[in-house]
Structure formats: C-alpha cells, structure tokens
Amino acid sequence: MTYGMSFDRNNDLLMVHAEHGGTRKITRTNLISGVQTVVADNYLGNPFVSPNELTVDAAGRIYFTDARYIGAGPLQLPNEVYRVDVDGSGHANSA
C-alpha cells in the first residue's frame, strides 16, 4: 500500500510503501520511462517498520517518517524521522 507521495527536483514520483503491503520502502519512479528504483528499504541493515509520510526539501533531500501505528510484531528500528541525501546516504532522527 502506498501512503506518502511527492515529486523530487527531477519531477520523478517518490512513493512511500508501508508495512501493509509488505514492502516497507521508498521508491522513485521516472514518469517518462516508467522505471522504478528503490531509494531506501532499510537503515543500517534493519528493515523499516512502516514508512508513512514523505517530503522533499529545496536541496533535494528526502525526509520520511517510519513508525509502528498498528500491529505487534518485533521492531528492529525505533520510531524515527529519516533523511536520504542527494548522494543516497541516509540519516536517522534528522528532522
């Protein structure tokens, strides 16, 4: 299931895929070619809990939330706000 959506500086569509669909990742889709790539699906090797909201700042950095809203499965990551820099590097609790 897709929750948050936004466009990046290249007008590619960024989408948040939450826990309910089993994918738990952030993707980028080029709307001209249709090619979809994974921007992030883990932090330090641990899968996200349930990414939800997404925004992009003027520098092109992607910010998104990852938190447990329902369910009782084990958490490998705490509820956080994450950032993906233009170079692809990631950071936690950066809001």
Image (tube, grey):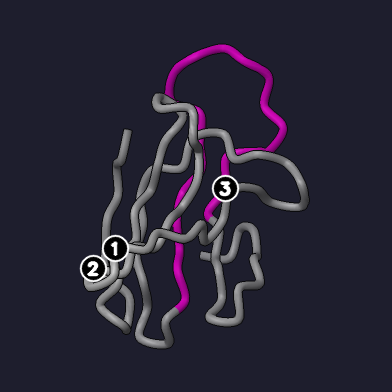
Q: Which residue is mark 3?
A: 80
Amino acid beneath label 2: Leu
Q: Which numbered marker is on residue 74?
A: none
On whether residue 55 falls in the magenta region, the answer is no
Q: Which residue is mark 2?
A: 31
- Residues in magenta, as a range: 61-81
- Residue drawn at (34%, 61%) of the image: 14
Left or right: residue 1 versus residue 75 is: left
N-terminal label among 1 and 3? 1
x and y, in percent, of residue 10 in the image: 31, 83
Amino acid beneath label 1: Gly
How far apart marks 2 and 3 lie (CA) works out to 29 Å
Amino acid beneath label 3: Glu
Which of 28/5 is in front?
Answer: 28
Q: Is residue 26 above or below residue 29?
A: above
What is the magenta segment's predominant secondary structure? loop
Secondary structure under the numbered disc 3 in the rendered image: strand
Q: Residues within 10 Å of mark 2 (few under 14, many from 20)?
A: few
- Residue drawn at (57%, 34%) of the image: 49
x and y, in percent, of residue 23 in the image: 49, 35
Cβ atoms under marks 1 and 2 closer than 8 Å:
yes
Check the image and name the residue furthest to the bottom: 59
Cβ atoms under marks 1 and 3 closer than 8 Å:
no
Q: Nearer the viewer, mark 2 or mark 3?
A: 2
N-terminal label among 2 and 3? 2
Q: Which residue is mark 1?
A: 34
Which of 58/25 is in front?
Answer: 25
Cβ atoms under marks 2 and 3 closer than 8 Å:
no
